Amino acid sequence: MGRRGRNDHPRSRDQPGGWVEIRKENAAFEEYYRAQNIVPEPEWNTFYDACRETLPVTFRITGTSHHDALQVRDTLVNEYVPFLKNITWEGEEVQPPSQLPWYPDGLAWQIKVGKTVIRKSKPFARFQRFLVVETDVGNISRQEAVSMIPPLLLDVQPDHAVIDLCAAPGSKTAQLIEAVHAVPEPTGIVVANDSDHKRSHMLIHQVKRLNSPNLVVTNHDAQLFPRIRIDDHQQDSYLRYDRVLCDVPCSGDGTMRKNINVWRDWSIHNALSLHQTQINILNRGLHLLKPGGKLVYSTCSLNPIENEAVVAHAVREWRGKVRIVDCTESLPGLVRRKGMTSWKVMGKDKQWKDDAAVDDIRASCFVHGDEAELGIENCMRIYPHDQNTGGFFITLLEKAAETAGDAAPSGTLKRKAKLEDNDDEHAESDKRAKPDESDPVATLPEEPTTSQATATAAAIDRQPLLAKKKERLPRDANEEPFKFLPPDHPAIENCWSFYSIADDFSRTSLLVRNATGEPVRTIYYVHPRLQPVIALNDTRVKFIHAGIKLFAYQKTLEGSCPWRVQSEGMTVLYRHIARKPGDSVRVVRCGLDTLRTLCDFTFPKFNELEDKEFLDQLLALTEGCVFLEVDPGTGDKPIVFPMWRGRGSVNLMLPKQDTAELLLRVFKVENVGDDGKKKTELTRLTETTDITPADTESEAPSTADQTETDLEILI
């Protein structure tokens, strides 16, 4: 987690009136890290040169269905990568995309090709289009390679309660969600939190594509994250997490390969200012962690003040209740260095310091001599020159099993600064800024005891939900409250009857997003485990997103159900369609040929359908939404889509991005012309395409009309 703001270009607008070139050099950076001996001196030049090179693009094949992710991977491997081999550009051989060897199942990839080649080489034009389409529907997500490591080390299981305390922009959160959804009907939940209100909505945009009812997004300072009550009848019944991710705010100097401003702005002041905030977040994460659970602490910084010093302080303070896990055998193929057991401390005056008595530097920044005993070498350091990545630091911590002294946080806190209930300045601190002197946690004594830290956590839990200042949010942001519907609400009864939904599908987990609590436009569904989380904490926790769209209201003829199934909730609901004899099940079946027709045409009339068996199924049903089962013809499970059965026509209810992805991946159809505009006629890419692995300078289709995407290689 780096500092806010980024600039991937080798220049920055220093002042109005012109661009100033940023040189990839910083004498203070070089002096500091050479003195720290973060790499042996003979390696320094190799390390420093790698830091100044452009970072390769990496992306991950995503999805809550592992089967679907493997299908996308196989499409990439079989239909695109073979055409990207043996290509030369301006006399040099171009490297094809390659898998990251340490990422499971070959779902993470690296591209070392420059943008010029991608734009002008015809084979890469097809590849580019594939990336655009799959990114639009959420099957591919750009993510830096080192950023993928922390969620993998957590080893999240489908029944785990997981929290990501500093979640935005959401790439790691997405990995956590995917791990929970490793089985068709998981019981685990993911709480994704971010302190910045606007960035928390960016987070929603990133993870919403996974359509997970097991996710809730909150907006709190990670240092002050409240306990969540899960049972109103038990006094001490609070949610404790099996897995905690603390990817904390940091100086971000490990991102120098993509964030060019690091070279201009680097200062030791950044690390010193963030050190206590990082301690507070890690300590809060450990309090929220269930005994026997695991926590990952990570930064995109190289500085031991933000890394080993923070971890050592936490392990030391928890006095044997927390240990650092040796991950040497995890992720085979990943090159990593051991954690540092000694380092130097530089003050803000750029002078080296020997103890904490000078320059107001916290004692926890310094080496205490017990670092080897604490197992600090088991921390992981990732360096740019080892495997062509950014710099990163990761530590896996494990909490000891429950003991008498490890009860839920309780007690009182004597603060140096009083937190007023109506003080907006303390409502949500900026997670990427340095701690303000008025912050109640930042002004605690330098070396709090375990009892003091426990009292701090208890005081945090008692804080009320404070008012937020109004700020500009994304256009699709929803700030309305969460209101659960009673199980016997007429709208629910109507849907259950019309769609033959089985009794095993929870009626208590349906909600709306409006103050009236009445279903007007949309009915959402959350996993039953999240129902008490939201219902019992709405005045103490700032929830900003939860649930997937299950039904949307649409006026129809009298007598029909006005609630149509949404594509987000189709997979969840489809598993609970009653199949008992005599049920009027709204399921129709077809093959790929009929699916292709439904993709090509909007509202084809009944008399235009060539599949008579399909037509007979439609005619047997009343007007309204139906489930479409498509046999892929490969022996795999059916693909399910929402479809509208009209009076005399039918329509596949998919967003245009999903339809484009379906046409491209299943039917090998490219629907973008040479000018980048969508054509009314679709062009089929046959198996005997004339695109061959050879050098070419033909122009690739423009992507000027595509929606905003996080895969910046496409421009």
Image (cartoon, rainbow, N blue to C red):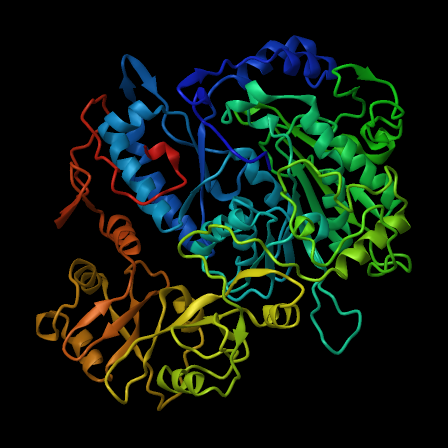
Residue 509: x %, y % from top left: 54, 75
Residue 49: x %, y % from top left: 54, 13
Q: Where is 36 relative to 660, above or below? A: above
Quarter of the image for the C terminus: give it.
Answer: top left
The answer to whether residue 158 shows anywhere in this view is no
Quarter of the image for the N terminus: give it.
Answer: top right
Quarter assignment of residue 651:
bottom left
Residue at the image point whose x is 56% and y is 37% from the top: 147
Residue 256: x %, y % from top left: 55, 23
Q: Where is 116 relative to 410, above or below? A: above
Residue at the image point whose x is 69% and y is 22% from the top: 268
Is 423 or 453 nearer to us in this picture? 423
Quarter assignment of residue 190:
bottom right
Quarter assignment of residue 544:
bottom right
Is 326 or 407 nearer to us in this picture? 407
Residue 302: x %, y % from top left: 66, 26
Residue at the image point whose x is 37% and y is 23% from the top: 95
Q: How many marks?
A: 0
